Image (cartoon, rainbow, N blue to C red):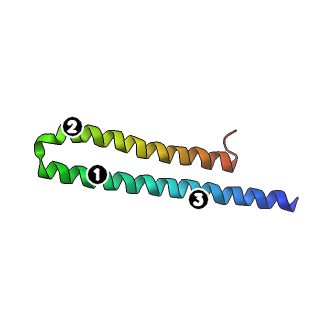
Amino acid sequence: MEDVKTISDLAQLGAGLAIGLGATGAGLGIGIATKGLLESIARQPEIAGKAVGFFLVGAAMAEACAIYALVIALKLSGMMG
């Protein structure tokens, strides 16, 4: 019975690490992408429309990674079948 409790505790730790690192990575990625977007628009304002389109694709990919981390965390914590 003690082994089951230990495994459950480790799963909870893994869930916390998964969502914490996943959200941190996505936040850093979107922050760096935003910095690049603003610098490129500042240098060449005429490419603003095209650059924003590429930025949105990149931001969506970064957010997808965060959502995958959330799904893993929910699975590990037992909140999702």
What residue sits 63% from the left and 46% below the top? 74
Q: Nearer the viewer, mark 2 or mark 1?
A: 2
Q: In which quarter of the image is residue 52?
A: top left
Q: Earlier in the sequence, mark 2 or mark 1?
A: 1
Residue bearing the label numbered 2: 50
- Measured Cα–Cα span from mark 2 to mark 1: 14 Å
Looking at the image, which residue sits at the far right?
Answer: 1
Q: In the image, what residue occupies the spot 86% across and 62% down?
A: 2
Q: Is residue 60 left or right of residue 44?
A: right
**Nearest to N terminus: mark 1 or mark 3:** 3
Q: Quadrant of the N terminus?
A: bottom right
Pointer 2 local density, CA inside 10 Å: few below 14, some 14–19, many at least 20: few
Task: Give, as a three-letter code, the residue at label 3.
Answer: Leu
Which residue is at a point 28% across and 40% down the rendered structure image?
54
Q: Element at badge 3? A: helix
Q: Work out how far the residue at label 1 is from the one at label 3, CA to CA, in angstroms.
A: 25 Å
Mark 1 Cα-neighbour bin, 10 Å: few <14, some 14–19, many ≥20: some
Closer to the chain start, of discs 2 and 3, is 3
